[in-house]
Image (spheres, coloured by chain):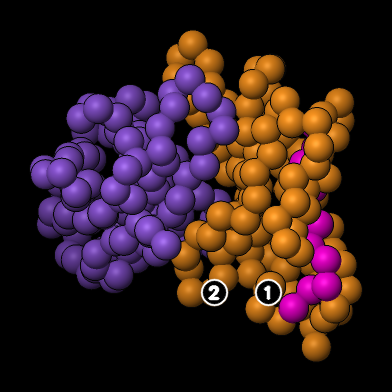
Chain colours: A orange, B purple
Amino acid sequence: AQKITQTQPGMFVQEKEAVTLDCTYDTSDQSYGLFWYKQPSSGEMIFLIYQGSYDEQNATEGRYSLNFQKARKSANLVISASQLGDSAMYFCAMREVDTYGQNFVFGPGTRLSVLP
Amino acid sequence: EPEVTQTPSHQVTQMGQEVILRCVPISNHLYFYWYRQILGQKVEFLVSFYNNEISEKSEIFDDQFSVERPDGSNFTLKIRSTKLEDSAMYFCASSEGGRETSTDTQYFGPGTRLTVL
């Protein structure tokens, strides 16, 4: 079963506008972490933002914020004031820790294109 | 700012040859990981390593793969007899540690692109 779902294979946004990238997850654990990574065309994976399952506040990091809705099991990434350099693949990932160890899984990604 | 480094950035090899991909994790990190990403596909977990031994591995990480921490800084992934389908980007990552916590952020290296001919 898919642990992480990103339903938008591709998104377009106008420069300076905000964009939301969707992520839903599936877990039965109470304690887990949700992460977003950016992968530009150069290929590296850049950590953007983290949300813990027990965090009551939505995480924010500069222009990135995470819209965490625990009951709906969603962790959408919001990028405000998009810039051309935001064009990249964006991956949602989840870390679970249970008695069998840790599990870190990635979603299929969303390709964001920022238009001038 | 400390970062994970990987060498080489690109490795081309013939099918059946052995390759070793190298990584230098962030110095105070205790957990190390290898992932692969076949072109255009999602990132797949291969293996995690803690306290000089494998802590978890995926189905992909079969007998042709091995990992080693030969000294205090390097972390290597060896593929014994490469196959065409091993062509992918291989990412090393490290985290501070905390098997017991889910808050452990993994920081990725820039990747090694492996091409098997």
Query: Which amino acid type is shown beneath numbered disc 2?
Result: Ser
Q: Do the residues at discs 2 and 1 belong to one chain?
A: yes
Mark 2 is surrounded, within 10 Å at the Cα level, by few (under 14), some (14 to 19) or many (20 or more) other residues, namely few
Q: Position of residue A107 (x, y in %)?
A: 63, 45
Q: Earlier in the sequence, mark 2 or mark 1?
A: 2
State the residue position of label 2: A41
Query: Magenta span has B28?
Result: no
Q: x and y percent of residue A1 in the render?
A: 65, 28
Distance Cα–Cα, label 2 vs label 1: 9 Å
Query: In terms of depth relative to the viewer, which is nearer, A113 or B19?
Result: A113
Return the x and y of residue B40 as percentages of the image width and height: 54, 62
Res. B64 in view: no
Q: Chain of mark 1?
A: A
Q: Is residue A29 above or below residue B108?
A: above
Cβ–Cβ under 8 Å for marks 2 and 1: yes
Q: Residue at x 25, y 27 (%)?
A: B51
State the residue at coordinates (50%, 59%). Answer: A45
Q: Would you say residue A80 sits in the magenta stretch?
A: yes
Instruction: Say what secondary structure mark 1 lies in.
Output: loop
Q: How many other residues sit within 10 Å of disc 1, few (<14), some (14-19) or many (≥20)?
A: many
Q: Which residue is mark 1?
A: A87
Magenta span: A73-83
The residue under the point 60% across, 61% down is A38
* B12, B21: nearer the viewer: B21
